[in-house]
Amino acid sequence: MIVVKDLVRQFKSGDRTIKPVNRVSFGLERGTLASIVGKSGSGKSTLLSLLGALDKPTSGDVVVDGMSLAGLPDGKLTEYRRRDIGFVFQQFNLIPNLSAVDNVMLPIEFAGVRKVARRQRAGELLEQVQLSQDKHGRRVNRLSGGEQQRVAIARALANEPKLILADEPTGNLDEQTGEHIVELLKSLSRDHNTTILVVPHDRGLANKTDRRFRLQQGRLSEETVRGGVRETSLDSEGVPAQAGTAASVGGCAG
Amino acid sequence: MSVLARSVGNAFRNKIRTAAIVAVLAVAIGLALAMLVANQAVAAKVQELNASVGTVLTVNPAGGQGFEGGGEPLTQEQAATAAAVPNVASVVGTKALRLGTETATTSGTNAGRTPPTGPGGGGPGGQSAAAATTSLQAAIDAGTLGNRNGAGGTGTNTGTTGTQTAPAFSLPITATGIGAEVDSTGKALTIIDGTGLGDYSATTGKALLGTTLAEKNGLTVGSTFTINSQAFTVAGTFDSGTAFGNNALYLSLADAQHLAALPGELSSMIVTVDSMENVESTKTALENALGTDKADVTQGQRNLETAASSLNSVKGISLIAFVAALATAGIIILLIMVMLVRERRREIGVLKAIGARNRTIGLQFVLEALVLVALGSTVGAAVASFASGGIASALISSNSATAAAATPRGAGMGGGFPGGAQGGPFSGTTQLLTSVSANASPPVIAAGIAAVFGVAIIGALVPALLTARIRPIEVLRGE
């Protein structure tokens, strides 16, 4: 269970204070496949960074399986990222001079798994994301964008994390491979009880998720569909919103 | 892929840049190693010189310097006076004899010219050396210089005829009566075969022969020969290290005085001072006690001391240069690694984002630095092996020129008189200095490389620690 409590992240920009994440609260059960949509610059990536402990909130807390991230030292946050989190970055962020299999092996190596076992695991993951065998040993900077994206997804799955945070995971994939990745994510959430939060690049992927959130000017609302009518409700308590309780979204504090 | 494998891979990520870095490091490391090799070689030489400089003062009769002669001989009483001077550890009297071969002295053509004194006498000892004849043949040819000096020795060939060609001159043999088992410079004798003379203050009828002299005359321990028709038994043979030095023999002081028919008279005294620090003050005290009109006190190996001092400055310079080159290598590593860390901030952020510990990332950068240093050290060691000899020679020659200029000519020539030799026993100071052999020995190179690696680790640690301060979100915010 992941519980986000009144999360705020603010930045100073000259005289202005910007709050890309402003008092966001929600909860996700284990095994949920959820999505966050919103305009560019609405704070989706910032929210993912806070959930993945890449960034520290100005206030509020994220509680994962009862463990509060607020106040954890850097070493514990690193351990949390290594053990519980899988990232798929929008720009892939692979290590360019390493091969596909070496990139996937990195988080497994950091977890202390022996070389033979990690190579075998990395190979299996690359197979899962449908990267052909002959490209496993190829440097990632010689792979296409779609292939790099699959390597990035495989790397995110490497340590069987509790929570996968994926920023446009199918953005560079053709329709068929994209479908396959969506099915892979769904099976992970269903069969391995992995919680997955994606920022989809199109509405199609968002519609396939269990829960859909919208982030607008730092405030989070959840979309529900009842009787063919789409409703948006603000939920500051992390409890699924009730139909007909739509509320306005909060603005940016200046 | 392990951290080490990743570090090696990263070191070669940009081959042209790696080559440039290795070249720069090789120059710094090569220079550091060359300086270390030179420093070690010079240190060894200084130690050797210090051992030779010792604490020995030589006392000769006043006026015995050069070719002038004159003055009063030294006596046993003066030896007792010298022994009473503070800080004097021991006094050993010597009595020098110049031995001409019996066949040469009885030859009509050479009559009156043996034993020659003056030119070719080789030093002040020559002035107080008594003449005697022996059955021994000199082991060394007189050579051009010996013959020239011998011809000018007494001038008998410019007799009434005025046309007689001078026959080949036979080099005299040095016989020294000694009061202890030391040579004429105070150094312990290196006895190769047999034993010493036992009691050096009594007449023993025994002698110690130089190896070449014994060989030339077919003598071994127990053989006999004569001096002034008196039989002497070979008690042992010694090696002085030089051919001319081995054309000599040692007797007990009493035997030499008896042969010279000058009991109680000394050619020189070898005074050993209790420590290096007291040498100068003891020299003055001896001059005061014996009188400067009676005795000359010389610090025989002062030129060597000057040389040692000169080499010490070379040692200091080379050590400073080693440390400076080492520091340069460290700074080069530091700057390169700072550059690499700045360049790879995003990569460091990604590694942290996927769970790499700070120490894992830091170790990766330190290992990468060590890979570069290993390459630089390999090339640098090759550079050092070629350059160290030249660098050491350049340093030493510039310093030994100063030392040689400061060396008084003829100083410390007391006691020796082999006329065939050019100059005294210390005329080879410059050669001694330049004989420093700066070979790049594996232990020295290994020690130098260990120091380089130590500095490189320090140089790489700072940038490695900088990686700990990089927060993943700072570098990934561009997403």
Image (spheres, helix red, strand yellow):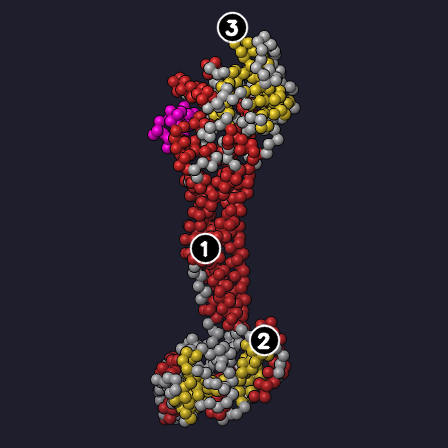
What chain does mark 2 sit on? B
Residue ID for mark 2: B274
> Can the viewer see residue A18?
no
Judging depth in this view, the residue of B388 and B407 nearest the camera is B388
The residue located at (50%, 45%) in the rendering is B333
Judge from the rendering whether residue B252 lies leftward or rightward of residue B102; answer left or right. Answer: right
Compared with residue B447, is residue A86 higher up or lower down, i.e. above or below? Answer: above
The residue located at (49%, 16%) in the rendering is A210
What segment carries the magenta color? Answer: A126-151
Helix, strand or loop at label 1? It is helix
Helix, strand or loop at label 2? It is loop
Q: Position of residue A166 (x, y in %)?
A: 49, 23
Q: Amino acid at mark 2?
A: Asp
What chain does mark 3 sit on? A
Q: Nearer the N terminus, badge 1 or badge 2?
A: 2
Q: Position of residue A13 (x, y in %)?
A: 62, 24
Judging depth in this view, the residue of B251 and A125 nearest the camera is A125
Q: Looking at the picture, do discs 1 and 3 lie on one chain?
A: no
Residue ID for mark 3: A227
